[in-house]
Amino acid sequence: MRIQFLGATRTTTGSMYLLEVNGKKVLMECGLFQGHREEETARNCCFPFDPKQIHAAILSHAHMDHAGNLPNLRKQGFTGNIHCTFATRDLASIMLVDSAKIQMADAAFVSKQRAQKRLPPVEPLYTMADAEKVLEQFVSVNYERHVEVVDGLTVTFRDAGHILGSAQVILDITERGKKFRWLFSGDVGRGSDDILRDPAPTENVDYLQIESTYAGREHASRDHADENICRLVSETLNQKGKVIIPAFSVGRTQQIVYVLHQLTLAGKLPRVPIFVDSPLSVNATEIYRLHPECFNETINKFLHEKENPFGMSNLTYIRDAEQSKKLNDLKEPAVIISASGMAEGGRIRHHLKNHIGFANNLILFIGYCAEHTLGAQILAGQNPVSIFGEPHEVRAKIASIDSYSGHADKNELKRYVQRISGNIKKIICIHGEEAQCLAHVETLRSMKPNAEVIAPVYKEALSI
């Protein structure tokens, strides 16, 4: 077997790994790369292989840094099956179309700028039609079912506890009379999630390919996260203010809705209006409701014995743009949850524009904000901040709770590895910024002294 690392090498974006087994080529992940515009365009538009020669693809979960370039793969000639879980396929069906809208809007914006310089227009990376067409190639399978992808390569998906449908990818490979097991961790959840099950351990592993997103740091404890949410929201509502929560559409929105639901049922929060204002978030939440097989025991019991965990009488989901605009006229205290989580796009920017200037309001971040994003500027205390090209004074209270991360931290990744059985010969650290990957290498070398531990660079290849 040969594997080439074509993305998420000493960085966290553009996951892509090309396997060659028994003369067949299989692509594991096909994510969008994010970075400086020129490099981003070059990496995303042009694959370092011929898509027509790929026999099949495997997808661990639906986030765009893992799945976002599949429509372009198909557009350039890939005709094989894409193997994933049922929930991943359903989430991809909305997220890829949403990504296509963004690609088309970006192309239109750049083309307009180029027209002023009398330059030809640019084409989007892919269109909505491309995104819809690639869904025909998805082959869905439940956790723990074995599927032969190509001769000598069987895949089994095991729960990763990261987002709905996320999976560890177990590859059982038979080649030239030899058998071995390769485990790709996918993105590993923290465990003890409000909604999802814990990452499941894997047995008899020979080779481990593991994510390193937070391998060099520790998250804040979850023990008091809900209490902090309750305190911050209560204080704001008592001041007749509004709570604005930037939240990613998949995972974080559903989690904060569930937390607010539980706090309201417990009588710890007043039954004020709560709005989820993001078409993608609304669609994603509907898909969550369709997949209770991914839920942990607590939320499953709540679903069957009480009510919908993502719905309550004071909660309104908003798709329509006109309804969204009416939220600006609200006089009463309310909670508004909107995408994107980093405040870089979507309707959240409108809510920030209209609410960040009032001292009785709260802007509450519950996820990571990358450097240079609007969210990061607000969290860093920049004042004023630019929203839609205009300066806005920051008078609202700003708070951040990072306990709801969907990625395992240093200690949680260590526990994940400790639960893996087998004589691991080699460990490959991917999907982390360079400092995180190298920190992970050192940690794992001390944990597994008999294994070779590496952090490959872009386009590096490894033969087994």
Image: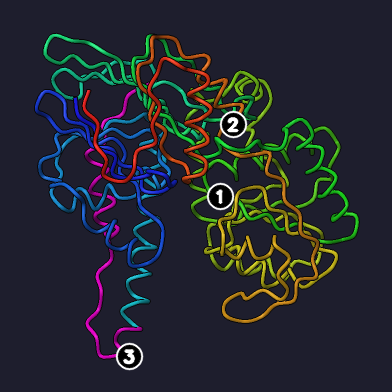
Is residue 115 rendered to the left or right of residue 61? Answer: left
- The magenta span reads 113-142
N-terminal-most mark, 2 or 3: 3
- Which quadrant of the figure contains the C terminus? top left
Q: Give yes or no for contact between labels 3 and 1 (Cβ–Cβ under 8 Å).
A: no
Q: Which residue is mark 3?
A: 116
Between circles 2 and 3, the one closer to the viewer is 2
Q: Who is closer to the viewer here, 28 or 242?
A: 28
Of helix, strand and loop, which one carries label 2?
helix
The quarter of the picture where residue 241 lies is bottom right
Q: Which residue is mark 1?
A: 248
For the residues marked 2 and 3, what is the alpha-carbon distance in whole angstroms? 50 Å
Rendered location of residue 106, percent (x, y): 37, 69
N-terminal-most mark, 1 or 2: 1
Is residue 29 rendered to the left or right of residue 299? Answer: left
Rendered location of residue 301, percent (x, y): 64, 19
In the image, what residue type sits under mark 3?
Gln
Residue neighbourhood size for the residue with mark 3, other residues' Cα within 10 Å, grouped as few (<14), some (14–19), many (≥20): few
For the residues marked 1 and 2, what is the alpha-carbon distance in whole angstroms? 23 Å
Of helix, strand and loop, which one carries label 1?
loop
In the image, what residue type sits under mark 2?
Lys
Residue neighbourhood size for the residue with mark 1, other residues' Cα within 10 Å, grouped as few (<14), some (14–19), many (≥20): many
